[in-house]
Image: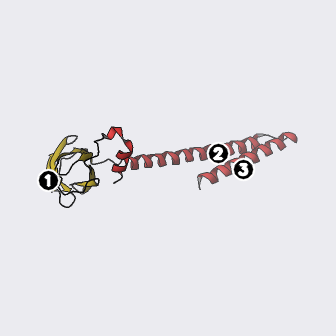
Amino acid sequence: METRNILELGILVTLIGAIYTALSAAFGESLINGILVLIIGGFLVLLSLLLSEQKSTKKTKVRRKTREVKKPALYRISPKTEQKMPGEKIHYTTSITNLLSEKIDGNVKIVVPDGWKIDKNNINFGPVKKEETEDVNFEVEIPQDAKLGFVYKITIVVSFLDHSQELSAVVELLKEEDELLTIEEDEEIMKALEEL
């Protein structure tokens, strides 16, 4: 029987007990039967409340378990954004922090725009112990003929075990007349670059 049905039955029995007790008192009869019916009705109401509380606790436990899904690692690419001119080089660091209880070994694959040079595009890392961080470094060179005024994306894919995470960094190529802006000075540029 469902909790709601038990509650409804308990309320109904309690009402019947109250009416029976009132009628017994009005006609001078024994009140014991009415009081027993009231007690049974009260018991059913209490039982339904306890059952509903127990179901609520089970649902809460299930929800907590699904929220406790742990990330296998933390990732960071630095620098995230750069403003450069053609022919310049950018040194990148990808940091991988292991959050698993076991050591991890993996691979970092870097994808650059066509025509860009990279010193290493496929780099192995590890083993990285629990709660330790390993940095993977690489350097990208912007070609002399890269289009000024454009924003380019560098894609970094970190893979280990059965997990894969894509990170990205952006490079804005400035026109010669553009002045260099720091990202802190112009939040709109930062938001636009992150959306790429």
Q: Nearer the viewer, residue 102 or 185?
A: 185
* Residue drawn where x is 56% and y is 47% of the image: 52
Residue that badge 1 annotates: 123
Q: Give the residue furthest to the bottom.
A: 114
Residue 121 left/right relative to 6: left
Going from the N terminus, do you reach mark 1 or mark 2 first? Answer: 2
Residue that badge 2 annotates: 45
Residue 196 percent across, percent down from the top left:
33, 54
| Kind of residue sitting beneath label 2 | Val
The alpha-carbon separation of the residues under discs 1 and 3 comes to 73 Å
| Kind of residue sitting beneath label 1 | Ile
The mark closer to the camera, 1 or 2, is 1
Mark 3, secondary structure of its residue: helix
Above or below 167: residue 186: above
Residue 148 left/right relative to 29: left
Going from the N terminus, do you reach mark 2 or mark 3 first? Answer: 3
Residue that badge 3 annotates: 12
